[in-house]
Amino acid sequence: MYYVPDGTLKCGYYECPKCKEKFLDVSVKEIIPCPYCEDETDYEIGPDEDLNNLQSDAKLIQVLEGEDVEKMDTLLSLAITGGNYDWI
Ligand SMILES: [Zn+2]
């Protein structure tokens, strides 16, 4: 498992409208802060940039349960690690 711990029975499938990242998270909320955008904006931007942060929130696309959690986790991990070796 890449995004969520082994044995996760329920998780959310999210897409960030800003950076187009798709990922899984153990939380199942309508909107969560995008971890990828947060990484980018961490430096040089103070805590009073909350308005910008609103746009980097990832939206819940689907709630995954049971076997679907592991299937989607594998699928997304492959999409990231497969064929993207240029940066190594
Ligand atoms: Zn993002």
Image: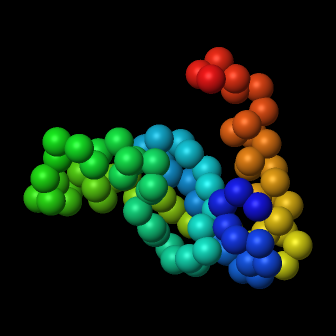
Asked if residue 69 lies left or right of residue 13, the reply is: right
Q: Quadrant of residue 24?
A: bottom right
Name the colour scheme: rainbow
At 58% across and 78% down in the image, what residue appears?
28
Asked if residue 77 lies left or right of residue 58, the reply is: right
Image vertical order of residue 31 relative to residue 35, above or below: below
Where does the N terminus fall, quadrant-wise? bottom right
Q: Residue 65, can we see it? A: no
At 74% across and 78% down in the image, what residue appears?
8
Q: Quadrant of residue 61?
A: bottom right
At 78% across and 33% down in the image, what residue appears?
82
Asked if residue 58 lies left or right of residue 64, the reply is: left
Q: Residue 85, can we see it? A: yes
Q: How many marks?
A: 0
Residue 48 drawn at (x, y percent): 11, 58
Image vertical order of residue 34 relative to residue 69, above or below: above
Residue 12 drawn at (x, y percent): 63, 70
Asked if residue 36 lies left or right of residue 61, the reply is: left
Give the residue furthest to the top: 86
Give the residue furthest to the front: 88
Residue 41 drawn at (x, y percent): 29, 45
At 74% across and 49% down in the image, what residue appears?
76
Decide which of 88, 81 is in the foreground and name it: 88
Decide which of 53, 6 is in the foreground and name it: 6
Where does the C terminus fall, quadrant-wise? top right
Q: Quadrant of residue 53?
A: bottom left
Image vertical order of residue 49 relative to residue 78, above or below: below
Residue 43 drawn at (x, y percent): 23, 44
